[in-house]
Image (tube, rainbow, N blue to C red):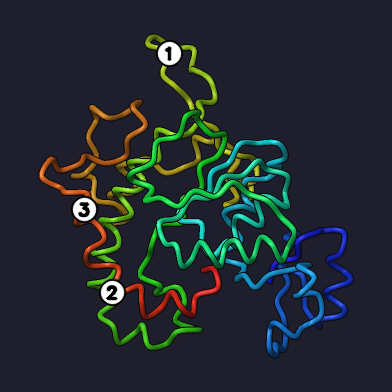
Amino acid sequence: MTVKNESELKKWEKLLGGKRIGNSNTLRLQKIGKVSEMPGYKEGAWWIQNFSASLPVFLLGNIENLQVIDCCAAPGGKTMQLVSGGARTTSIDRSKRRVETLKQNLERTKLNSKIIISDVLDFTPEIPYDVVLLDAPCSSTGTLRKNPEIEYLDPISRIKTFSEVQKRLLNHVSNWVKPGGRKDVPGRPIQYVTTDDFLSHFNLQKLSDLPTVDELGTAGLIDTSNVDASIFGTGKFFKEKQEDKKENIYSEIDEMLSGTLKNDDDE
């Protein structure tokens, strides 16, 4: 679970019998009853969220007064983290049902975010954002502990299907990020910011310690055949097939999601 105010961590750690994870605002509870009847829930002092789900916002570091958009935001765990951290937040999601849950969570926690009901692929922002957070639809294999039935739903097929959707979404939102300046070399290419918190979490000293595209390919972590040198510096990550039809992108995943999203707090 994530506590809204860092100053109240010790209070809720004691009242709920939890233990703080590192220096985050997340508590791991030893026991959990009916969530809605637990102390502090109705008052909006905290919300249910796995530590892994809270990491992306945690790694952003200081986000006070930054313009941030949370894509595929519902049911709102990361949005609430962003707002409570002082970010000027916009939340976008295509599911009206899940957006209602997002609104209820924001109302309960007394937090505010601009909400847009739209497919991310149909949306173009008027201004670039300091931070673009994309929690794209996924195979839910990371929630096996809570949803063991996923193991029997052909996880390999799910991963392949969802990865295609994730690439399209990532490609689309990559141009929404505000540049962090230009490198002082011929051509002055645009640079983007990697936070110190991100590097520290992965025990990296500097950006050059990050693996190269070739190293990631050799390790089998990415398919380098999808990386096109002509797109470097354009903000794009993958070549898009011209024959891809946007209206078909969700055709296979909606049914897959229907059995897991209803039980998903915010993975």
**Who is closer to the viewer here, 249 or 123?**
123
Q: Nearer the viewer, mark 1 or mark 3?
A: 3
Using a 10 Å C-alpha cutoff, classify the residue at mark 1 as few (fewer than 14 neighbours), some (14 to 19) or many (20 or more): few
In the image: residue 234, left or right of residue 60: left
Question: Is 149 placed above or below 65 here?
Answer: below
How many angstroms separate mark 1 from mark 2 (CA)?
A: 46 Å
How many angstroms separate mark 1 from mark 3 (CA)?
A: 37 Å
Which residue has dot 3 on it?
247
Q: Residue furthest left?
A: 243
Numbered label attached to residue 188:
1
Q: Earlier in the sequence, mark 1 or mark 3?
A: 1
Question: Is 233 placed above or below 248 here?
Answer: above
Mark 1 touches mark 2? (CB < 8 Å): no
| Residue depicted at x 87% and y 59% | 7
Query: What is the quadrant of residue 194 in the picture?
Result: top right
Which residue has dot 2 on it?
255
Coordinates of residue 130 in the picture (x, y in percent) = 57, 34
Question: Is 3 placed above or below 56 here?
Answer: below
Using a 10 Å C-alpha cutoff, classify the residue at mark 2 as few (fewer than 14 neighbours), some (14 to 19) or many (20 or more): few
Q: Residue furthest top?
A: 186
**Who is closer to the viewer here, 206 or 155?**
155
Q: Earlier in the sequence, mark 1 or mark 2?
A: 1
Coordinates of residue 51 in the picture (x, y in percent) = 62, 68
Q: Nearer the viewer, mark 1 or mark 2?
A: 2
| Residue depicted at x 65% and y 57% | 80
Numbered label attached to residue 217:
none
Three-letter code, disc 1: Arg
| Residue depicted at x 55% and y 33% | 193
Mark 1 touches mark 3? (CB < 8 Å): no
Three-letter code, disc 2: Glu
Secondary structure, mark 1, is loop
Coordinates of residue 71 in the picture (x, y in percent) = 47, 50
